[in-house]
Image (spheres, rainbow, N blue to C red):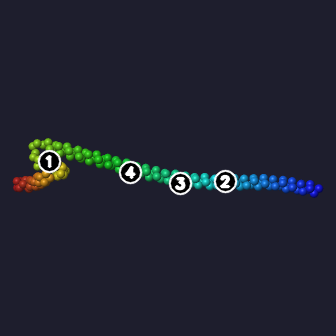
Amino acid sequence: MTITVIIIAILICLIFYFVLNDKINKIKKEYVKSDLISEMQEIITYFNQEAERNITLLEDKIKEIDTKIKKFEKLKKSLEEKYLIETNKNLKKQNESTELLNLDDKSWQQKAYSMFENGFSFEEISEKLKKNVGEIQFAISYFDLKEKIKPSEKKKKKS
């Protein structure tokens, strides 16, 4: 009888062991599962925050680039306008210089003075007329002085 009681006691202990072991394993699995779920949620939250921050940075950079593009487009447009203006000025100067050079009835001194009055520099005039800069300066100063004297002569003749 004692052996039966001992065997029954051992069987009862084994039943309690397996039932408790099963419950402990279920609790461990639930704990690990909840722990994994919470850690995954933290990772997803962190990932979403970083993604939002990166998207904001990209949007800011895109806005910055757009403003720079607009600024450079305005600059390009103004440079193109200036280029056209300068090109037109140069074409006018070339046309005027050829017109002035084609006048056969004027001396080279008169041509130099006319070109100077139209905005050409001494160097440009000397290139066009194939004369020294000193000769050009002298001729222009001569005609300039002559022009200044003419109004005073006209006054004298009137009185």
Task: Report x, y in % for residue 144.
Answer: 12, 54
Whether residue 99 is situated above or below residue 39 in the rendered picture: above
Task: Report x, y in % for residue 76.
Answer: 35, 48
Q: Residue at x 26, y 48 (%)?
A: 86
Q: CA distance from mark 2 to mark 4?
A: 52 Å
Q: CA distance from mark 4 to mark 3?
A: 27 Å
Residue type (three-letter) at the residue carrying disc 4: Lys
* Residue that carries the numbered disc 4 in the rendered image: 71
Which callout, 1 or 2, points at the residue further toward the start of the chain? Answer: 2
Between 124 and 5, the one lying in front of the other is 5
Which callout, 4 or 3, points at the residue further toward the start of the chain? Answer: 3
Task: Report x, y in % for residue 54.
Answer: 52, 53
* Residue that carries the numbered disc 1 in the rendered image: 130
Which callout, 2 or 4, points at the residue further toward the start of the chain? Answer: 2
In the picture, which quadrant includes the N terminus? bottom right
Mark number for residue 36? 2
Residue type (three-letter) at the residue carrying disc 3: Arg
